[in-house]
Image (tube, rainbow, N blue to C red):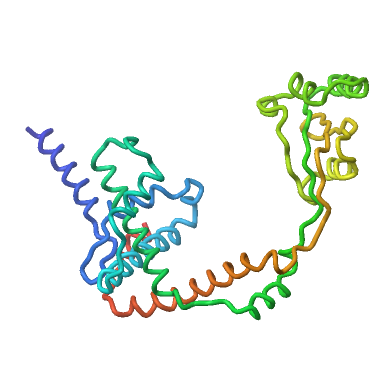
Amino acid sequence: MLSLISCKTSEDRKELKNRIVLASINGEEITHDDFYAQFSNLPETANIGDNIYSLKLELLNSMINEIIILKYAAAHQISVTEEEVQQEYFMNFGEGYITDHAVKENLLNSIRRRLTIQAFIQKQFSMITVSEKEILEYYNKNSEEFYEPDEVSVQQIYVKDKEVADKIFAGLKAGLKFEQAAEENNIEPYNEDPAQIYVYRKGELPPEFEHAVFELGSGKYSKVIKSSYGYHIFKLKSKKLARVIKINEAEESIRTTIRNKKINDAFEEWILKERSRYEIKINQKFLEE
């Protein structure tokens, strides 16, 4: 009898914990369960050390903002159709992939909320535009973004033993095909796709590789290069010379960058004002645990 009572009490405590209210927005609650359903999806590396408080606060505020946006959308007839929700679901998960009804409903609700928020942003900030003057100013002030350094596409032979590398190099000089040598000799994981092409920009490779690789002519291969990992031979497939991206090429990406920042700034201003209309309570004790 005592063990049964103890077991029930334990279950009650668990249920009570799950019902802990972490925040309320005009009485609408975000519970322990609601929060951890999203918190558990954060990257594992994010949930460490001193970051835990700021991570909890950031996520909780995001969930509060979502509730406020959805309330605003409902009050202003901003919605999405069930056809749009279903279409998005099938694009992401396919038909019949998820058989658990509860899981599927949760996913559909999540998609519905996300699409509604997107519809809200599109409608609320549709008047935000970017002028040609702003694009030109951004281009001139951020010239480093539009510089593309020399770039090479290479294949690689990678082995651990110098004698093996020297033997391969001699074979290449005698007419051995580079791809065949890579297929027969590359160590893991480079042996999985011996013909794989690697693309590097100047400044991305270790110094012992960079000089040799960027000096190669198209179709030529390097000498054996020693590194802390082993021995390498590179073959140059193609090379792109450094260039400055012209403004007409970058115009649309600049427009998108500026507009997104304007939307983000406008949203921060909007959500701050909108939050002031609500009675928001946050469980500070929970954030500090």
Vertical position of residue 244 compared to residue 238: above or below: below
Q: Where on the picture, by quarter, is residue 98?
A: top left
Left or right, residue 164 beside residue 7: right
Vertical position of residue 7 compared to residue 203: above or below: above
| Residue at image coords 10%, 38% | 5
Q: Where on the picture, by quarter, is residue 3?
A: top left
Q: Quadrant of the C terminus?
A: bottom left
Q: Where on the picture, by quarter, is residue 112?
A: bottom left
For the residue pair 234 and 89, the one nearer the viewer reads as 89
Left or right, residue 169 beside residue 288: right
Left or right, residue 69 beside residue 250: left
Vertical position of residue 182 compared to residue 243: above or below: above
| Residue at image coords 28%, 64% | 23
Residue 230: x and y in percent read 79, 29
Question: What count of labels does the image hold?
Answer: 0
| Residue at image coords 70%, 29% | 190
Q: Quadrant of the N terminus?
A: top left
For the residue pair 149 and 39, the one nearer the viewer reads as 149
Residue 249: x and y in percent read 69, 64
| Residue at image coords 75%, 46% | 200
